[in-house]
């Protein structure tokens, strides 16, 4: 296919693309919210329709016990590689809703960006793959590779049902390469290939004492306070060098080769830009590592939320019966999420005082993953980016997680190419999530060129 023709075609369809994407954005597919089960199914059905309309065949919804998985394929390029495209149609919760400038599920163009929950993570990027496919059909071009699609609705809650599905559907999903667009570019108009993601180990820790909240005058000071204990535990999870104190936490971390650390150091980076992107006061983290190293090659531990006792308006005098913290640990290659969860549990049981009870609830986990950057599929992605963006891509790792990347790699024996078009400051998981429109349209072009590159 002629690139100029492709480019002109995509540019001529901008309005339709935005209208269609708005349709799937409108469906409130928040996987963390149990009251949205119907929306999850509706969203999966709506994406299935888009797939069929684009010409994708064998589109099927698979029941999983959780949210449906969407499969589809188009396998008419005999002798050519098979590409498995993965994406997720679930989104993060929208709260705090009052911080949104326009309603989260109404896709709104403002300036150069499309604002909505899921615009960047990941409905917009999933959609780009469908439109890249469709472009070939509309231009009467043969699809140059065999394509398979697997879209899930539980990525944001740890891909609980995808893992067993991949393991039991090896033949259905069999592919030479997996392509995922669910990461960010290093900056605007800076084409990027991500070759590493961190893993995840998520748990909840609940400290409890009395069966119900008690009058703090009658009991305060004479029994232990779960909020105090929890705060103490949280404050003991890091040392003054920013290291995680859970014993053996770092045991399996392998040193990143000096050459790779040098590569990372050569990427354009400035504290000022990082602080602008984050809106934070100052950089912070493990002693002896740069910001990108802290995010990409070091494991970390963060409390995502903490609650307990009275948090409403005004004052209330109680000793809370319990307090909870949600804790996530980001892991790096060679660490095992199961092992880290166990280590955490052992540590907490060691340090909790005998004056309270503690319970740990393991929530979900995912393993870290690395893509072999010398694989021909990565070269193809690199060539596609260069064709569309006019410059060679940056190679980066990311601090985020896509839980099943390693499962794809191990089960299918295929590399996973992380070719994402988001941006670090697009507020994913936060109010006013948006997608830079130029990346949206150029991403569609890049994916179409990628299919061609992979074919040759
Ligand atoms: N799209 C992100 C993954 C991501 C985030 C890649 C940042 C690169 C940079 C994905 O949808 C996501 O947020 N994943 C979760 C997974 C978790 C719930 C297991 C994450 O990283 O928090
Ligand atoms: Zn995502």
Image (cartoon, rainbow, N blue to C red):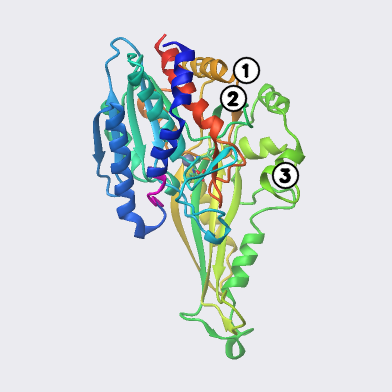
> Which residue is at the front of the view, 275 or 135?
135
Rendered location of residue 287, percent (x, y): 74, 43
Q: Which of 145 and 163 is in front in this view?
A: 145
Q: Mark 1 points at which residue?
A: 391
**Residues at discs 1 and 3 in contact (Cβ within 8 Å):** no
Quarter containing the N terminus = top left
* Mark 2 residue crowding within 10 angstroms, few (<14) / some (14–19) / many (20+): many
The residue drawn where x is 56% and y is 34% is 184
Q: What residue would you read off at disc 2?
A: 191
Identified at 69% across, 49% down, the residue is: 279
- 213 versus 91 height, above or below: below
**Which region shows up in magenta?**
24-30
Q: Name which quarter of the figure residue 409 lies in.
A: top left
Pointer 3 residue: 275
Q: What numbered label is drawn on residue 15?
A: none
Identified at 68% across, 21% down, the residue is 259
Q: What's the CA distance linking mark 3 and mark 2? A: 22 Å
Judging from the image, what secondary structure is the residue with disc 1 in?
loop
Query: Is 159 on the left or on the right of 120, as rendered?
Result: left
Tell me where residue 312 sits by quadrant.
bottom right
In the image, residue 156 lies at what x, y percent? 45, 47
Badge 1 or badge 3: first in the primary sequence: 3
Dot 2: element? loop
> Which corner quadrant holds the C terminus?
top left
Q: Which residue lies furthest to the bottom in this view?
A: 218
| Magenta region, main secondary structure | loop
**Badge 1 vs badge 2, beta-carbon distance below 8 Å:** yes
| Earlier-in-chain disc, 3 versus 2 | 2
Q: In this rendering, would 98 be left or right of 295?
A: left
């Amino acid at each position: 296919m002629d690139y100029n023709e492709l480019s002109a075609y995509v540019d001529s369809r901008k309005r339709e693309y935005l209208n269609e994407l708005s349709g799937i954005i409108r469906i409130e597919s928040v996987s963390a919210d149990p009251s949205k089960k119907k929306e999850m199914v509706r969203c999966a059905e709506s994406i299935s329709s888009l797939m069929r309309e684009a010409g994708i065949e064998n589109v099927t919804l698979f029941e999983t016990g959780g949210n449906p998985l969407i499969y589809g394929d188009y396998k008419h390029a005999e002798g050519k590689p098979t590409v498995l495209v993965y994406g997720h149609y679930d989104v993060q919760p929208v709260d705090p809703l009052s911080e949104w400038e326009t309603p989260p599920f109404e896709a709104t163009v403002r300036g150069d960006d499309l604002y909505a929950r899921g615009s960047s993570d990941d409905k917009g990027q999933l959609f780009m793959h469908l439109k890249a496919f469709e472009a070939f059909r509309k231009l009467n071009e043969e699809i140059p590779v065999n394509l398979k699609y697997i879209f899930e609705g539980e990525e944001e809650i740890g891909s609980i049902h995808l893992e067993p599905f991949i393991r039991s559907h090896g033949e259905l999903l069999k592919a030479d390469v997996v392509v995922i667009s669910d990461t960010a570019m290093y900056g605007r108009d800076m084409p990027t290939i991500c070759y590493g993601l961190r893993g995840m180990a998520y748990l909840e820790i609940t400290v409890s004492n009395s069966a119900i909240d008690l009058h703090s005058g009658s009991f305060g000071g004479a029994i232990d306070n779960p909020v105090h204990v929890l705060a103490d535990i949280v404050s003991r999870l890091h040392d003054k060098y920013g290291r995680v104190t859970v014993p053996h936490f770092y045991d399996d971390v392998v040193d990143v080769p000096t050459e790779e650390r040098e590569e990372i150091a050569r990427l354009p980076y400035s504290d000022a830009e990082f602080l602008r992107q984050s809106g934070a006061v100052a950089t912070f983290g493990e002693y002896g590592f740069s910001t990108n190293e802290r995010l990409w090659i070091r494991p970390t531990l963060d409390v995502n939320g903490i609650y307990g006792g009275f948090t409403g308006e005004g004052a209330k005098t109680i000793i809370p019966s319990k307090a909870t913290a949600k804790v996530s640990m980001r892991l790096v290659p060679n660490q095992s999420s199961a092992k880290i969860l166990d280590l955490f549990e052992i540590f907490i049981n060691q340090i909790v005082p005998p004056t309270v009870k503690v319970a740990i609830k393991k929530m979900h986990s995912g393993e870290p993953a690395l893509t072999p950057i010398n694989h021909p599929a990565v070269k193809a992605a690199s060539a596609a980016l260069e064709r569309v963006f006019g410059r060679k891509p940056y190679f980066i790792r990311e601090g985020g997680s896509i839980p099943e990347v390693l499962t794809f790699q191990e089960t299918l024996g295929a590399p996973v190419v992380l070719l994402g078009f988001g941006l670090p400051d697009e507020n994913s998981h936060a109010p006013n999530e948006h997608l830079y429109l130029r990346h949206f349209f150029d991403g569609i072009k890049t994916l179409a060129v990628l299919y061609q590159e992979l074919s040759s």
